Amino acid sequence: MRNKAMILEEDGCRVRVVHLDRVKRARRDAVQESELERLALIFKVLGDPTRLKIFVALADGEMCVCDLAAHLGLSESAVSHQLRRMREQALVKSRRDGQVLYYSLDDGHVADLLRLGFEHIRE
């Protein structure tokens, strides 16, 4: 059955709606703005190729900044800067052993994001 288009007026704007039931369901199931902003920040952090290289390296286990720098061909300062952004979004965590900080993925969800992303692009 085909729905007729309806015209809704909200906040002085006229909006054409074809499937009112779908609009109502989408509004009911909408995610809070604060959660959307947090998720957008996570994807923004994941959207940088250098940080993705760090994520992939850490997926195999923890590494210190100097090892990551050697792997990526970057300065330790540049790697530390990237790790700080990743840590701010709870994507990586650190563990101190003496004077050395070892970094790893924060939890299995981060590894899942990587795995799903690679599955998607490779299909």
Image (spheres, rainbow, N blue to C red):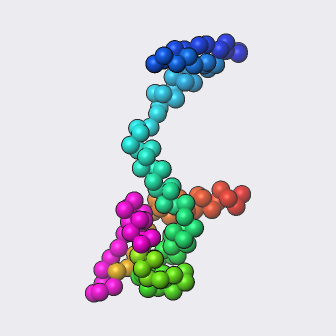
Residue positioned 60% across, 58% down in the render: 117
Could you say which is closer to the camera, residue 61 or residue 64? 64
Residue positioned 46% across, 33% down in the render: 30
Residue 25 position, x and y percent, is 51, 26
Q: Quadrant of the N terminus?
A: top right
Q: Give the vertical position of 110 relative to 12 (above or below).
A: below
Residue 75 position, x and y percent, is 47, 83
Left or right of 23? Residue 38 is left
Q: Is residue 120 visible?
A: yes
Residue positioned 51% across, 22% down in the render: 24
Could you say which is closer to the camera, residue 75 or residue 65? 75
**In magenta segment, residue 23:** no
Residue 8 position, x and y percent, is 54, 14
Residue ranking furthest to the left: 98
Residue positioned 52% across, 29% down in the render: 26
Q: Which residues are magenta?
A: 81-100
Quadrant in which residue 35 is drawn = top left
* Number of marks drawn: 0
Left or right of 29? Residue 122 is right
Q: Quadrant of the C terminus?
A: bottom right
Left or right of 97? Residue 79 is right
Q: Give the vertical position of 9 relative to 49 (above or below).
A: above
